[in-house]
Amino acid sequence: MTRMSRLPRLLMAIAPMTACVHTACSEGPKPDQLAAFSKAYEQDVAGSSCRVAPPDILEITSPNVPEIDNEHQGIRPDGKITLRLVGEVQVAGLTPTEIADKLQLQLAQYYVEPKVMVRITSAASKRFYVFGEVGGQGAYPFSGNDSLVRALATAQPNRAAWKEQVHVIRPSHDSKERHELVINVDDIIHHGKMENNVLLQEGDIIYVPPTPLAWLGQQIGSVLFPVSGSLGLANAPLTASETAYQYTLPASQRSGIGYYGY
């Protein structure tokens, strides 16, 4: 089949994709689908059950146990940390609350009613992933307070991004725990529909597909210019003049957290 003979097939393929813009795209996620995802406005963090793993870094404070107060410990590959008085402690797989309880129990032989607080200062073992039509594909650190909008503000969708059809996938080996949402991010950004700004969990995958027109351009580009690939314009990041469609903050604020307060 010649390159030019493939063009009619590509043009025919765009018709059903375009129809989606006026049907499924406008419907939004169903309530039973949304039920599997927490909303960013409902809680401050993804949950209190975050379990630590190497190479997370922990901050341990204890006002009445100076030997471990203000201690910062990185979890070793064997899942342990080492503290004065108690020595090696297995912490991998535990929550910060469980670690604090474990340390208090071990310290009880030295102190009366020791109080210990543990928090994760660097969740280096936790990631979520962004793929598709964005400026920065790949893995991103999971903080426990990452919403869909915040993740896209960081990944920077490009001109080819189909913002009405952003997929949020919660993978699992168990089919009953595997979920997928298709969210119209434009509705969140331009109309404030925060009920669809879901809170991400560790391991979540965000996929931003190309618009039907961008997809067609990419396919035509691959036919006409197989060496150079698809059209470069589609992959260019959004410019400042297109602020109505960009998800990023000004460059002076982009390094911080809390994009748009979400």
Image (tube, rainbow, N blue to C red):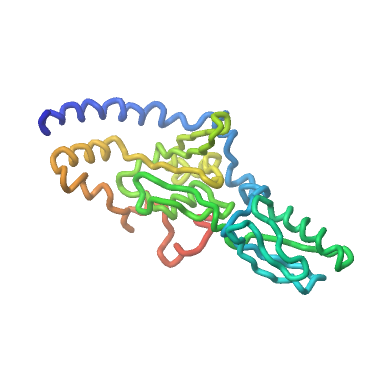
* Location of residue 103 in the rendering, given as x and y in whole percent from the top left corner: 77, 60
Q: Is residue 153 above or below residue 116?
A: above
Q: Is residue 183 left or right of residue 175?
A: left
Task: Identify which residue, 238 or 244, lies in the foreground.
Answer: 238
Q: Is residue 45 left or right of residue 155?
A: right
Q: Is residue 236 left or right of residue 186?
A: left
* Location of residue 173 in the rendering, given as x and y in whole percent from the top left corner: 54, 34
Q: Is residue 57 left or right of residue 68?
A: left
Residue found 22% across the figure and 39% down from its top? 217
Q: Is residue 106 above or below residue 203?
A: below
User: Could you tell me how many numbered marks the image carries?
Assistant: 0
Residue found 65% across the figure and 54% down from its top? 92
Classify the position of the N terminus by image quarter. top left
Give the farthest residue toward the right: 112
Task: Identify which residue, 115 or 82, lies in the foreground.
Answer: 82
Q: Is residue 116 above or below residue 194?
A: below
* Location of residue 50 in the rendering, given as x and y in whole percent from the top left corner: 64, 50
Residue found 82% across the figure and 64% down from its top? 107
* Location of residue 215 in the rendering, given as x and y in whole percent from the top left corner: 27, 37
Task: Identify which residue, 219 or 100, lies in the foreground.
Answer: 100
